[in-house]
Amino acid sequence: MSENQQFFETITKSYVDVPITEDGVDTAAFCEASENLVKIFGLFGNPAFSVVVNDLTGNIAKIRKFLAANPESAKTLESLLATDKAQHPKEKDRDTTSGLMWLLRGLKFTAVGLRSNLQNPEEELSTSFTKGYEASLKKWHGMMIRPVFYLAMKACPYRATFYPKLGSPEDVVKVKMEEWLTALENIVAHMEKVFRDGKYGEI
């Protein structure tokens, strides 16, 4: 990223650009936007966040693999879930559904953390992401995993270090971030309902 280039100009797909039709959320576009979200954690510059990055990328890979094997019947996240269910009658065998569920939980954690930070200009990222963790992933994690994530939260950069890495001018970057974040929140909320209504699990 060049000195005057904004982060949101460098990503290949924003959540704003993910098509959502009456058939559902476009799977390929959603995966690409999520791969670009992972790059934000690269700006954190701390290896402690590898636990978050690895979790997200591993689950994106599961979805991409299923899409490659079922290009027609997994075009949307909704049809992907239905196809996985049809192919695997036993819930415990639905690895792709589990992968999507955990990916959405990770995206919710990210969205809550960033939203808290945007809304509270005096709040440091470590506080914001701890709030995000406690409002999302924490209840799904056992006693062995929680300390690892809390350690990662403490490794967040100071906001004074982080926001300049997104580019300048800051007010323009924050407008782009707001659009991107709102689109992400809308997709997560949409998929929470899909999972709930289809009895696929809880996000």
Image: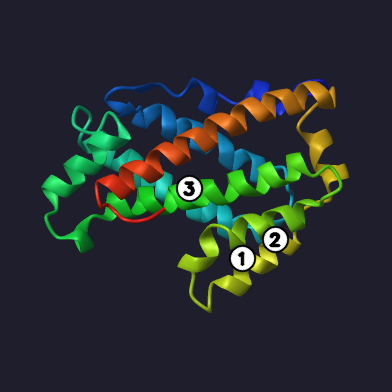
User: Which residue lies under the disc numbered 1?
Assistant: 149
Q: Nearer the viewer, mark 3 or mark 2?
A: 2
- Circle 3: residue type: Thr
Nearer-N-terminus badge (3/1):
3
Q: Are marks 3 and 1 in contact (CB under 8 Å)?
A: no
| Residue in the picture at 88% in, 43% down | 160
Q: Label 2 to label 1, Cα distance in Å?
A: 6 Å
Q: Are marks 2 and 1 in contact (CB under 8 Å)?
A: yes
User: Which residue lies under the disc numbered 3?
Assistant: 57
**Is 38 rendered above or below residue 6?**
below
Question: x, y percentage for residue 178?
Answer: 67, 29
Nearer-N-terminus badge (3/2):
3
| Residue in the picture at 74% in, 45% down | 117
**Is 197 rendered above or below residue 129?**
above
Label 2, secondary structure: give it: helix
User: Which residue lies under the disc numbered 2?
Assistant: 153
Is residue 193 at least partly visible in the picture? yes
Q: Quadrant of the N terminus?
A: top right
Q: Quadrant of residue 5?
A: top right
Label 1, secondary structure: give it: helix
